[in-house]
Amino acid sequence: MENSILKEIRKTIVRMVHKAKVSHVGAAMSVVDILYTLYFDVANINKDNITSPDRDIIILSKGHSSAALYSVLYHRGLISSDDIEKYSIDGGSLPCHIDKEKSPFFEVSSGSLGHGPSLGAGFALAKKMDKKAGRVFVICGDGECNEGSVWEALMFISTHKLDNFVFIVDYNKFQGFGATNDVIEQSNIAERVKSFGFDTLVIDGNNLDELKKALTHKSDKPIAIIADTTKGKGVSFMENKLEWHYKSPNDEQLKIALEEIEEKY
Amino acid sequence: MRKTFINTLIELARNDKDIVLITPDMGFSVLEPFFEEFPERSINCGIAEQNAVALAAGLALAGKKPYVYTIIPFLVERAFEQVRLDVAYMNTNVKLIGIGAGFTYGAAGATHHAIEDISLMRSLPNMTVCCPGDNNEAEQIVRQSVNNNKPMYIRIGRHNRGIFDNNKIEIGKASIIKEGTDIAVISTSNMLPDAAGYCKQLEEEGHNPYFISMHTVKPIDKNIIEKLVNNGVEIHTLEEHSIIGGLGSAVAEVIAESGKGVKFKRIGIPDTFSHYIGSQKFIKKQFGLYFGEEE
């Protein structure tokens, strides 16, 4: 898949986590194609409309993958290179988990799992009440779906027919301390979400064409997109390896990672 | 006091289309008038308190003024992390209306008792904590809450013992119901009628007590406490809440940092759950918190 911007976005992510010596890089690399498609192609969000009640809302509920959001926003021109340089350093501008005070483009603070769907439901409901345009996209991890609060929100969203709500699961199949389906079975997550009243699509979540099609899909029901992704996508030694939820690349690993991304994208 | 809350909110909602009422399936025989008058702004989100609070935060971020109403332990404790992050940390304009202060739901048992909420809510940055002691205080606090675009917790109690504070109420400022000389009785929430009885008891013993309602526990009115300390006035605090972390602790912190000392006594629930079976009044009596008329 040729894409020079996406190539640079992935490179920025690995450089950020290398420099700051922090991780969650695997989760950032699985979700980054979703965020890229939203911010570069699908969502109506820009510098001029960021306070408009008609804008689209994007909530990255899996806040630990913040490096992906920061990199996408930077390459989209919505946050600065200085912000990226000051990622997770003493006195810096961008924290490991998202703090909404740091940029108007962070709709919410996140980091504790399972809050995004309810927050998004609030935004979506306010749009309905005031007859405002725009949709609300909430991105959760598959591990995050262990949280009961996610399901509280989904029940509410379908009951209230919030057809302006799009629930996206970054189904990368790994979580904090094991493979997702070994910890809590999620292989039937599409059926489960569908049974909660969502128009549910299952796609390759690292495929831009499939992402665009799904993210522009319209329905009279709330939409759920189960985005089948690869944790650590784009760097072979990070792919499907639990340890890259925690590890930060050393100098040598950074070099290999940047070369691989250069070749693949 | 629940009726005072909802009647006041209805009045406010008539002039403010952004007010939204959310309940996680609580409010039978109380909230119906709001639901009838403003059906599009009334949400029963089901028995899901975490969703209720975060949903409210989302609405607030989109410009609404949500009030979340339910029994205190389920609001404050079940949904504490949503309160901490989605309301306090994000500094959203969410009003948390906790009902059943102290032993209001006495017979329901400890699951429904609210004895740690002031302590928990007081520790959250950005959170204002109001604990009205009668319907006059409750009405004025609810009325003022709508113009305060910050997180706020309002602890609603119950007693049918009348109005004790006729003052004009200002959030963050203690209400002096009666001036005194040697002892100050500082009360919050449900204890207001008992504080009146306690003052009477002190008077019979020859004292001339101040009678003060601390309807706002956070921010605490430091000035009045420091003034009392400077005048060497002994201080007694009364709360239908654990003696750990509530009004007594808040007042003690101010006294301790004043650089001076006065005699001080916390009257509240000792560090224990209630296993008593009975009414609010009965349970209060077991803990020495009832200072009212005997039938």
Image (spheres, coloured by chain):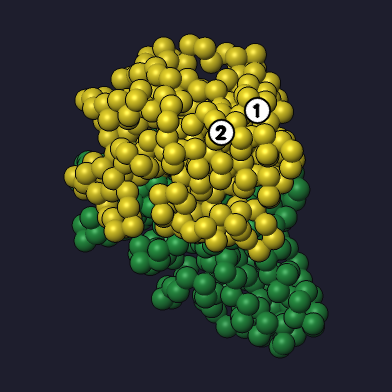
Chain colours: A yellow, B green
The residue lying toward the viewer, choosing from A226 and B6, is A226
Does B8 sit above or below residue A250? below
- Residue for point 23% across, 55% down: B17
The residue wearing badge 2 is: A261
> Dots 2 and 1: beta carbons under 8 Å?
no
From the image, which quarter does the N terminus of chain B lie in?
A: bottom left
**Snapshot quadrant of residue A117:** top left
In the rendered image, is residue A230 in sight? yes
The residue lying toward the viewer, choosing from B171 and A200, is A200
Residue B46 located left or right of residue A20: left
Please, what secondary structure does the residue beneath circle 2 have?
A: helix
The residue lying toward the viewer, choosing from A203 and A233, is A233
The percent coordinates of residue B92 (x first, y second) are 44, 56
The residue wearing badge 1 is: A238
Q: Pointer 2 indicates a residue of which chain?
A: A
Does A254 sit above or below residue B229? above
Please, what secondary structure does the residue beneath circle 1 have?
A: loop
Instruction: Tell which circle, 2 or 1, labels the residue nearer the N-terminal end.
Output: 1
The amino acid marked with disc number 2 is Ile
- Residue for point 57% across, 69% down: B219
Does B112 sit above or below residue B19? above
- Spatial CA span between label 2 and label 1: 12 Å
Tags 2 and 1 both on a single chain: yes
Q: Residue B164 — which label?
A: none
The percent coordinates of residue A167 (x first, y second) are 39, 29
- Residue for point 47% across, 20% down: A228
Q: Pointer 1 indicates a residue of which chain?
A: A
The percent coordinates of residue B37 (x first, y second) are 20, 46
The amino acid marked with disc number 1 is Met
**Snapshot quadrant of residue A252:** top right
